[in-house]
Image (cartoon, rainbow, N blue to C red):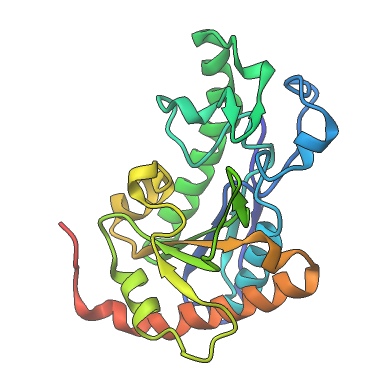
Amino acid sequence: MFLPLIEARDETRPSANVVVVCEHASNHFPEAFGTLGLGEDARRAHVAWDPGALGVARAMAAELNADLVAGSVSRLIYDCNRPPEAPSACPDRSERFEIPGNCTLSETDKAARVAAVYTPFRKALATLMQARGQGVLVTVHSFTPVYQGAPRDCEIGILHDRDSRLADALLSEWPGDAPWHASRNEPYGPGDGVTHTLVEHGIARGWPNVMLEIRNDLIASEATQSQAGRFLARRIALAMPALNGGDRYA
């Protein structure tokens, strides 16, 4: 069993009751699973994790005095932002990389990964949110500036599923002089299957929720990760008062 990283908020300080999640924080390949037949370059590439995302998530959590839950193994072992039935939970190919160790997985193999990685992550996040009672859920990801040979102009994506409350509040108050441009449901959206955590944990509990996607060339250093995290934390804090206006989803 591979437990997620959990960094709890400081109970001696005021908190807005935000839970920050970073599902693809790590490119760790546990010995139990080997390297999946991948070389070091592939294991360090964005297909194996979200470079820079954990640094941003930690900076956000520190600024907001929020709880942080982060994945502890590569998303190629198991993608904790996917349900067990999704083919992309244990992908056999990601962009230009074939994942040999995932090409011949049996149902027993997949179930073992669910039990070892996904179930502990899901339970830990659910338990934490249940203990907090009510709050806001923010998930943090990064994406590659070039995908399948095509450059991406999007800098920060503000993603949501059918609950758009927090995304709407963020976008409506996004400053014109912000260092980064924000786009709704870019470079992915619900149709791409990327909102599992939002639906499973946020919408199911009635928590306002949002997924933040940051282009990884913009957060390549500790300094830029900290800058982005603090900026996004302030945007979340400023958006939260608008969430009391009632539900905007069915």
The reply to whether residue 39 is in sight is: yes
Residue lying farthest left? 250
Q: Nearer the viewer, residue 8 or 250?
A: 250
User: From the viewer's perspective, is 169 left or right of 97?
Assistant: left
Q: Residue at x 30, y 54 (%)?
A: 203
Q: Position of residue 25 (x, y in %)?
A: 66, 49
Image quadrant of residue 12?
A: bottom right
- Please tell me in which quadrant of the rendered image residue 247 appears: bottom left
In this rendering, the count of numbered labels is 0
- Which quadrant of the figure contains the N terminus? top right
Residue at image coords 71%, 69%:
225
Q: Nearer the viewer, residue 224 or 215?
A: 215
Q: Residue at x 65, y 73 (%)?
A: 62
Q: Quadrant of residue 145?
A: bottom right
Left or right: 5 with respect to 171? right
Rendered position, 177 above or below 189: below
- Residue lying at the far front in this picture: please name it: 149
Instruction: Work out whether 5 lies above or below 35.
Output: below
Where does the C terminus fall, quadrant-wise? bottom left
Residue 54 location (% of width, % of height) = 68, 58
Extreme residue in the right direction: 40
Toward the viewer: 96 or 194? Answer: 96
In the displayed orientation, state which residue is furthest to the bottom. Answer: 177
Q: Residue placed at 62% from the left, 52% from the top? A: 146
Vertical side of 111 occupied by 51: above or below: below
- Where residue 55 appears, as percent x and y from the top left, is 71, 63
The x, y position of residue 161, in whole percent, is 31, 54
Answer above or below: position of 101 versus 208: above
Visible residue check, residue 10: no
